[in-house]
Image (cartoon, rainbow, N blue to C red):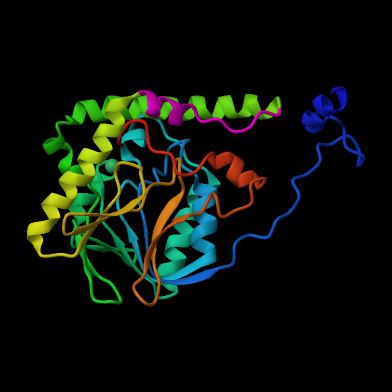
Amino acid sequence: MALSAWSTLWFLAPSATGGKRAPYSPHPLPAARQYRTVFVSDVHLGTRGCKAELLADFLARNTCETLYLVGDIIDGWQLKYRWYWTDAQTRVVAEILRKVDEGTRVIYVPGNHDEFLREYCGRNIAGIEIVADAIHGTADGRRLLVLHGDQFDGVIGYAKWLAHVGDWAYTLALALNDRLHDIRRRFGLPYWSLSAYLKRKVKNAVEYVSRFEEVVAKAAAPKGVDGVLCGHIHQAEMRRIGTILYLNDGDWVESCTALVEDAGGHLEILHWASSTPASDPARVLAGAEGEAALIPA
Ligand SMILES: [Mn+2]
């Protein structure tokens, strides 16, 4: 009993190598892969919640012919209130520009948090094409409408001012999450997500997600496309809704997901945080994967 209690507190004990904490054991990162297309959104650069290190690693370790940045990449709302920027966030920008230099076509579809970029739609900034929306042709001939998704907030009945309040509450929940995780980790307790817990408690959030997915699919159907790909609600998904394939690439504040297409047109949701080893410090930082945002952002 005493032994097991101590073993859970092993990290408090001075290591044999001179009083410092034992370093995390190195694990091999997942093998780099070549994709035809990578879609990422809801990175929220400029916020504390942004898992920039994981995203920079993901971008550095995977190549693609086309990279879609599906909105809320830079969080203009947060940066307006308070300037927050880290070296890892600079690395994300550097990795995107490196992709441009290496010949990847980079297409940026602004979202609501980076709506300041919408006035540049049709322009090319540093080799990145800024567009309001796009049609992506998959390798197997399907046509996907690519947009951020906030356009449908009004239809769902989510006012913009309310979204701002939601954004603030969501940021707070994520901050509490990280703090709580730090404390629990110190006591050797496993990861427990406050925001995931709250999400389960807040039934409205679950209803919002399914309603959002249906509204987006319904709007895409008359456009003569096979599917629609968006972000915005921080919940990765791939499912058929009526005749439309609904795709959501998730986010990089909680779940660290991307949507990827291989050379044959096969689409899948990639959980980058869970594809790294459990004891990887970067993963600990990212928290649990696959959980939804408490409040749509
Ligand atoms: Mn958004």
Q: Residue at x 45, y 27 (%)?
A: 197
Question: In the rendering, at what x and y percent does residue 89 appear?
Answer: 48, 48
| Point 43% across, 51% down: residue | 257
In the rendered image, which quarter contains the N terminus?
top right
Residue 146 locus on image (x, y percent): 23, 59
- Taking the image as shown, residue 187 lies to the left or right of residue 258, namely right
Query: Residue at position x 42%, y 40% from top?
Result: 46
Residue at 21% x, 41% y: name it.
Answer: 212
Q: Taking 6 as reference, is 138 left or right?
A: left
Residue 229 visible in rendering: yes
The answer to if 198 sits in the magenta stretch is yes
Task: Please give left or right for residue 206 compared with residue 26 in the image.
Answer: left
From this viewpoint, which residue is outermost toward the left? 222
Does the magenta run of residues contain 30? no
User: Camera-side residue: 245 or 248?
Assistant: 245
| Residue 107 vertical position relative to residue 161 in the rendered view, above or below | below
Part of the protein shown in magenta: 188-201
Q: Is residue 17 above or below residue 206?
A: below
Which quarter of the image is occupied by the C terminus?
top left
Picture quarter containing residue 35? bottom left
**Within the displayed image, which quadrant is ligand 1 positioned in?**
top left
Q: Position of residue 24 (x, y in %)?
A: 74, 46
All told, the count of numbered labels is: 0
In front: 149, or 271? 271
Residue 113 visible within the image: no
Image-quadrant location for residue 292 = top left
